[in-house]
Amino acid sequence: MLSKKVENVLQFVQKPGRYTGGEFNSVIKDKNKVDIRYAFCFPDTYEIGMSHLGMKILYSLVNERKDAWCERVFAPWTDMEEEMRKNNIPLYALESSDPIKDFDLIGFTMQYELSYTNVLNMLDLAGLPIYAKDRTSLTPIVIAGGSCVCNAEPIADFVDITLPGEGEEVTNELIDLLKIHKQKGSTKEEFLKEAAKIEGVYVPAFYDVSYNEDGTISEVKATNGAPEKVKKRVIKNLDTMFAPKEFIVPFIEPVHDRTVVEIFRGCIRGCRFCQAGFLYRPIREKSPEVVNEQCKAICKNTGYEEISLCSLSTSDYTGLEDLLDKLFDWTLDEKINISLPSLRADNFSSSIAEKLAKIRKSGLTFAAEAGTQRLRDVINKNVTEEEILSSSRKAFMKGWTGVKLYFMIGLPTETDEDVTAIADLSQNVVNEFYNNPDKPKGRGVNVNISVASFVPKPFTPFQWEAQDDIKTIEYKQELLKNSVKTKKINIGWNDPKMSFLEGVFARGDRRLSQVIYNAYKLGCKFDSWDDQFDFDKWMQAFEMAGLDPAFYANRKRSFDEVFPWDHMDYGIPKKFFEKENKKAYEAQTTPNCREKCNGCSANKLCGGECRELS
C-alpha cells in the first residue's frame, strides 16, 4: 500500500510505474508473521533490474520461506530522487512501501562497476550510514553479490558481507543464521564472525591490507578467525536446485520483456578475455525435460509470448536440439517465440537454423571478437572467418536479413591491421547475403557490429594486462569508422572514458572506496548512463583521494604481484591463468573442455576430476 506522501509525488515524475509495486505475481506477506525481511536492491532503474534473472530467482527463493519476506528495491531516477529528498520520503520497498532501513538484510546485486555510486546513494536515501563501520546495530546487514564481487575491494568499506559465487544455497544459510542471532540478541560482530565461517561468505572488515612503497599490495591478512581464502559457492545439480515457477509481470516494459530460463552454467571455451567464462565454471547443464517444464510453467503463470534460453554460449548446450523439439511441441501452437542469445559461429548447424526458421525471426548474434585469425588465436576464440561466414550464410538462407556481430578493440597485441580487419570481416558477411540466390526479394541486409573496449578483468588470463588508454581507444574507434565503406554496416561502441573507469574498479583495491565516496559526494550516480556520466567529477574524486587511475587501468602487472582479489578462491589456480597468458603471446590456442581437459581444476568444485596442471 503506497503511502500518501509517495502517491502525491508520483504526478511529478516521468515514469510513476517504476515506484508503485502491485504487479501481477508480486508477493505480499504479513510483516508481523515473518522473522526476516530482505530488501533485494538493484542499483539501477526498474526497467533494467526487472530484466535480471538473478533477482527473479532469489526473490522467489526467499519468498518460498514462511519465515522471510523478500521485497524489491530499485534506484529511483533523478526526478523521483528529487521528490523523495524534498518530501522526506526514505528509500522504500515496492511490495510494502516500508522504509528499507527497518529491514534485516539489504542485498545489492553488483553486475557492473559503474553502479557503485548508486549503492552509496541508495544507502543514503534509505537514511543509513554509508560506511559499514558506522552501522553498528545487528540489522540491517548490507550484503552484495554478483560478478563484481569477485573483487569486492573497491566497495569493501561500504558493505558488511559479499557473496562470491552462486547465491541459491548461501542466501538461505545466511537467513537461518541471522534469525538465530536476532533471537539471541547478538551484536553485529558476533553475527559476522559466525557468518564468515559459511562457505561463500566474505566479510571485508576481517581482512587487513598492507601496501608496498610503489602502491602495490604487500599482504592481505585474515583476522577474527576468517578463512585465509574465501571459497566461492557452487550449485552442484541444476536439475534439483530451486527455480521460479512464475515471474513478476512488470507494469512498464523492461529492457528484456520475456521469460528467461537458464539452460546451463559455466562455459567450455576459455576465451582469455572473458571473466564470466571462468567465474561460472564448472559447466553444469539442466536436462531438456527440466528446462521445458520450467518454460511451460513460467509462460502459463505470466502470459509471456517469448522465451529466452539463457547461458553463456547457448549453442554449446548438448541438449539444444532435443530441447527445441520439446519446446516446439507446444510453443508453435501457442505462438510463443524462442530466442537463442550467445550463439557460437562454429557450431550453428543447419539443423538449428532449420528449427529456428519455424518461429518469428528474432535477431541472431555471433561473437567474432576480433577481425584477424591471429588475434582470435591470441584470445583463444577458436573460431575461423569461414565459420563466421558459414553461420551467416545458413541464417540468410533460412530467411534472416540481419545479424549482429560482437567485436572488441584494445586487446593485447592488437595492431591497426586487426582493427581494420573488423570492417573487412563485416563486409564479407554483407557479401554473403547478396551472394545468396535465395535471398528475400526486395529486402536488404543489416549487419550491426557492437565494438566493446577491452577491459582486463580478475580471474582471466589477461588480468595482468595494461588497458589501452582513452586516446588510443579513440584513435582505434576512428580508424574502424573510416574503414567501413557501406551503410549496410552499423557500428556501436562504448564510451572509452566509461571503459577506462570500469577497468580502474575491476582491478582496484580498497583504497578506491574513498574515490567512490568522493564521486558520490560530488554528485556522481547512474554512471553507466551517457546523459548522467560526468568524467570530470570522477577525475576530481581521484585527485581528492591522491590516487592515479592510470595506476589501476593502464599498468601492466608482473606475474608475482599480489592482486587485491588473491584471497578469493574461484576454483582456478593463478598458475593456470599465467600459463594461458603466456600461450596468448605465442598465439597458441587451447582446446575447449569437451575436446580436452586443460587442468583448470574447476571440476573439483563439484567433486569431479580434473587433470593436474603441467
Image (tube, rainbow, N blue to C red):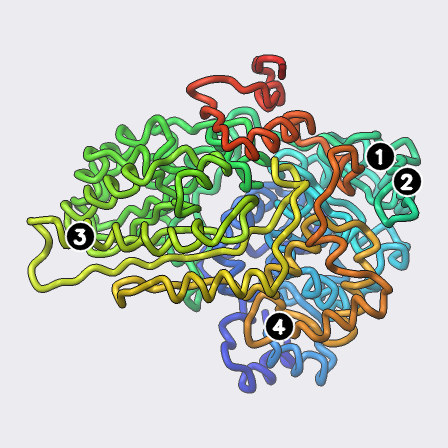
Q: Are marks 3 and 4 in contact (CB under 8 Å)?
A: no
In three-dimensional space, the C-alpha distance between marks 3 and 1, rounded to whole angstroms, equals 61 Å
Residue 537 locus on image (x, y percent): 72, 74
- Mark 4 vs mark 1: give the one in front: 4
Q: Are marks 3 and 1 in contact (CB under 8 Å)?
A: no
Residue 89: mark in rendering: none
Instruction: Give the side of residue 105 with respect to residue 320, left or right.
Output: right
The disc, 2 or 3, on the residue closer to the chain's N-terminal end is 2
- For residue 211, what is the image quadrant? top right
Q: Count neighbours of disc 4 (C-alpha within 10 A) and say few if under 14, some if 14 to 19, many if 20 or more.
A: some
Residue wearing tag 1: 194
Q: Amino acid at mark 4?
A: Phe
Q: Count neighbours of disc 3 (C-alpha within 10 A) and say few if under 14, some if 14 to 19, many if 20 or more.
A: many
Q: Secondary structure at mark 2?
A: helix
In three-dimensional space, the C-alpha distance between marks 2 and 3, rounded to whole angstroms, equals 65 Å
Residue 372 locus on image (x, y percent): 40, 44
Q: Are marks 1 and 2 in contact (CB under 8 Å)?
A: yes
Q: Count neighbours of disc 1 (C-alpha within 10 A) and say few if under 14, some if 14 to 19, many if 20 or more.
A: some
The disc, 3 or 4, on the residue closer to the chain's N-terminal end is 3
Residue wearing tag 3: 433
Q: Secondary structure at mark 4?
A: loop
Q: Secondary structure at mark 3?
A: helix
